[in-house]
Image (cartoon, grey):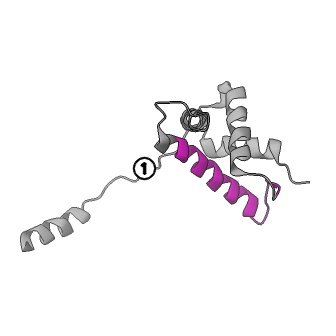
Amino acid sequence: MKKSIILLFVLTLIPVPAMAIFLSGNELLERCHQNVAAREGQTGVNYVMANQCVGYIQGVTDAFSQRELKTVCVPDDATISQVVDFVTRYLEGNPNLLHYSASSLTDVALRDFFPCK
């Protein structure tokens, strides 16, 4: 037991390279297609990916609509399903941009659909 604790402590001291993993537009669209399939009642849906789409877009929406200099003004009566649909349509309509980060593409889509006036 004591050896295990010491080994665990030593392993925590080993440096691991820092690595930022960003979601691309392609990856977000893949997840959002699973969300569409789930809502349509299709079989073989990856529900983890479907929920990642919703959670990701909800998080980005919250971040960009709550900042001091907010760039997105989502109406109070908008549902998360509507927001996900708008972002999914934007991604589908701009396949040449899908190599960019999902957060930046989501921001641009939200600005298009929900600009602050």
Q: Is residue 59 above or below residue 32?
A: below
Q: Main secondary structure of the magenta part?
A: helix
Position of the C terminus, as image quadrant, is: bottom right
Q: Residue at x 87, y 54 (%)?
A: 116
Q: Residue at x 7, y 69 (%)?
A: 3
**Residue 17, image x, y percentages:** 35, 52
The answer to whether residue 101 is magenta is: no
Outermost residue to the bottom: 2
Which type of secondary structure does the marked residue at label 1 adopt? loop
Q: How many marks?
A: 1
Question: Which residue is tagged 1?
Answer: 19
Which segment did they paint magenta?
A: 50-75
Nearest to the observer: residue 82 or residue 59: 82
Q: Is residue 94 above or below residue 51?
A: above
**Residue 36, image x, y percentages:** 61, 35
Outermost residue to the right: 117
Q: Residue at x 56, y 37 (%)?
A: 38
Nearest to the observer: residue 40 or residue 27: 40
Outermost residue to the front: 41
**Where, by quadrant of the figure, is residue 62 drawn?**
bottom right
**Residue 54, image x, y percentages:** 60, 47
User: Viewed as shown, does residue 106 lie left or right of 45?
Assistant: right
Residue 19 appears in the figure? yes
User: Viewed as shown, does residue 103 lie left or right of 51?
Assistant: right
